Image (spheres, helix red, strand yellow):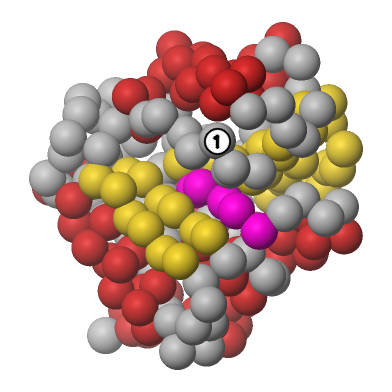
């Protein structure tokens, strides 16, 4: 069954973008799933899931590129960004799992789809023996209502929201930052709304782009 998911994923990318990107993506999907020992490639129709909020942005769940995740988390490690991370729109927990491999020890995910949260819990549990010191938490809820912990240093996004919701989430991040001043980082895959971060005083410290569509950045605020 796993290879059927890969085939579906390949054609989804090829039809919506291009054949070359599909080859690149499926190569990293297969290797990433095997490397981390999880199952996150399936393209779930969000309309068929139990949601705690309105579905206005995307119709299909898709995990962030393993290629980008490894580059982003390696860079955060070099920048000594700390050990605490929240994945806002965590899906099935792919970024959470990769974060653990790069040294994060307090990892939280939040998503508005109950079934995706259940998958995230399962995938994080799958590697928990390799990382016994990691504190995992998965929250089923709306990100725009989230109260972020004062010790969170890294906020991860895979372009999960429209501008209005993203603005509210950034506002919540700034509230956390004001309550406990500290250097914070936003790791943002497919950063379509990065101007909101610039407006909020974040500075881009890292950027990677490949094949026109595969891109991510790190944004820092002191």
Query: For this view, does 49 lie left or right of residue 126?
Result: left
Q: Main secondary structure of the magenta part?
A: strand
Residue position for label 1: 150
Q: Residue at x 49, y 83 (%)?
A: 132
Q: Residue at x 40, y 72 (%)?
A: 124
Given the current orientation, which residue lies at the most extreme front position? 180
- Quarter holding residue 156: top right
Give SS at disc 1: loop
Q: Which residues are magenta?
A: 83-87
Could you tell me if residue 29 is visible in this image? Answer: no
Could you tell me if residue 182 is visible in this image? Answer: yes
**Does 94 lie within the magenta span?**
no
Horizontal and vertical percent position of residue 140: 24, 46
Q: Residue at x 27, y 56 (%)?
A: 117
Residue 182 higher or lower than 44, as above or below: above
Horizontal and vertical percent position of residue 55: 24, 29
Closer to the camera, 39 or 1?
39
Residue 89 higher or lower than 177, as above or below: below
Query: For this view, does 18 lie left or right of residue 58?
Result: right
Neighbours of disc 1 within 10 Å: few (<14), some (14-19), many (20+): some
Quarter of the image with the C terminus is top right
Horizontal and vertical percent position of residue 219: 76, 34
Closer to the camera, 85 or 194?
85
């Amino acid at each position: 069954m796993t290879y059927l998911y890969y085939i579906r994923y390949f054609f989804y990318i090829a039809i919506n973008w291009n054949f070359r990107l599909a080859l690149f993506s499926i190569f990293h999907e297969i290797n990433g799933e095997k490397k981390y020992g999880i199952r996150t490639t399936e393209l779930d129709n969000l309309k068929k899931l139990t949601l705690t909020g309105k579905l206005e942005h995307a119709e299909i769940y898709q995990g962030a590129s393993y290629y980008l995740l490894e580059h982003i988390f390696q860079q955060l490690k070099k920048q000594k960004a700390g050990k605490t991370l929240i994945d806002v729109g965590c899906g099935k927990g792919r970024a959470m799992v990769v974060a653990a491999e790069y040294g994060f020890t307090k990892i939280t995910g939040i998503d508005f789809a109950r079934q995706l949260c259940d998958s995230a819990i399962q995938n994080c549990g799958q590697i928990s023996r390799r990382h016994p010191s990691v504190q995992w938490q998965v929250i089923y809820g709306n990100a725009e209502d989230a109260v972020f912990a004062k010790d969170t240093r890294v906020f991860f996004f895979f372009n999960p929201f429209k501008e209005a919701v993203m603005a509210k989430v950034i506002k919540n991040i700034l509230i956390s930052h004001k309550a406990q001043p500290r250097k914070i980082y936003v790791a943002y895959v497919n950063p379509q709304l990065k101007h909101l971060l610039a407006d909020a005083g974040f500075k881009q410290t890292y950027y990677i782009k490949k094949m026109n569509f595969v891109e991510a950045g790190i944004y820092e605020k002191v």
